[in-house]
Image (spheres, rainbow, N blue to C red):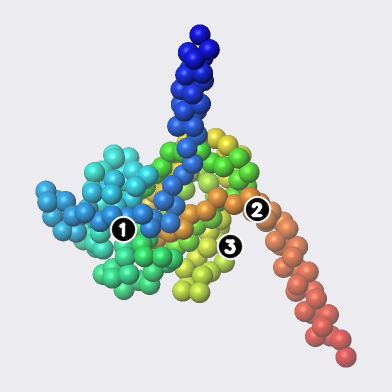
């Protein structure tokens, strides 16, 4: 009887751990780029190219994404390396994600999503990249309002959003570009540092301005 209870406890603990697995491959460096014979270059198998993530076109999961590819107008999910056709510098590491919504005449979105648990102590989420047009970030269908927190030495933006409401919860983290929009994404991080309130930032800016004015007036 005792051995059966122990076995049941092990099974329950294993199930719980499976349900609360954390996010993986947030910097997209775990890529193994295997070209698909049926799709041809530059398409690669999504499960190998972006393990942990699911690519979507108009909310439909895709088996393949492009590697160092360039869309001719249709929506596309790309894993780009240092030899990408755009000549864009690496964001951080060897790979980054380029989401390309469809061009004019189409209305197809491009997205990547991953379902896992947000760490319990999380206050904010940060990621590097650039947004051309529009990018929608959400958790479990709830939009996350992000803002620019700074820039990297190679001129990419550092974006941040408050995600404290969902700390400890399991759900899908989704990055989506609608049609006529592109976005570069890399190095996603969960942080225990809270996003400053807009009012606090305004007071800091006002204080700095008044301090500078006082210094200029001082004889």
Q: Position of residue 157 (x, y in %)?
A: 50, 65
Asked where in the image residue 118 lies, by quadrant, the reply is: top right
Query: Cα distance, mark 1 to mark 2?
Result: 29 Å
Foreground mark, 1 or 3, reads: 1
Mark 1 or 2, nearer chain start = 1
Q: Position of residue 129 (x, y in %)?
A: 45, 62
**Mark carried by residue 193:** 2
Q: For mark 1, does the 10 Å Cα neighbourhood hold few (<14), some (14 to 19), or many (20 or more) residues?
A: many
Q: Does 75 appear above or below 148?
A: above
**Mark carried by residue 149:** 3
Foreground mark, 3 or 2, reads: 2
88 left or right of 11?
left
Residue toward you, 72 or 94: 94
208 left or right of 195?
right
Residue toward you, 63 or 131: 63
Q: Does 192 appear above or below 139?
A: below
Which part of the image, by quadrant, shows the C terminus? Answer: bottom right
Mark 3 or 2, nearer chain start = 3
Asked where in the image residue 60 lies, by quadrant, the reply is: top left
Which residue is at the far right? 219
């Amino acid at each position: 009887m005792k051995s059966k209870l122990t076995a049941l406890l092990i099974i329950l603990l294993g199930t719980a751990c499976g349900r609360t697995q954390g996010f993986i491959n947030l910097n997209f460096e775990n890529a193994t780029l295997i070209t698909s014979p049926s799709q041809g270059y530059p398409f690669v198998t999504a499960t190998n190219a972006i393990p942990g993530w699911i690519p979507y076109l108009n909310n439909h999961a895709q088996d393949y994404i492009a590697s160092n590819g360039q869309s001719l107008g249709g929506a596309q999910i790309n894993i780009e390396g240092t030899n990408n056709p755009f000549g864009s510098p690496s964001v951080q590491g060897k790979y980054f994600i380029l989401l390309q919504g469809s061009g004019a005449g189409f209305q197809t979105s491009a997205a990547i999503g991953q379902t896992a648990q947000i760490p319990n102590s999380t206050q904010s989420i940060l990621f590097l990249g650039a947004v051309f047009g529009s990018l929608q970030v959400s958790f479990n269908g709830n939009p996350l309002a992000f803002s620019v927190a700074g820039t990297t030495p190679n001129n990419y933006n550092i974006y941040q959003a408050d995600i404290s409401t969902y700390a400890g919860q399991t759900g899908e983290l989704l990055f989506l570009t609608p049609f006529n929009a592109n976005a570069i994404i890399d190095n996603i991080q969960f942080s225990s540092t809270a996003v400053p309130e807009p009012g606090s930032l305004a007071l800091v800016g006002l204080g700095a301005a008044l301090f500078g004015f006082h210094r200029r007036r001082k004889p």
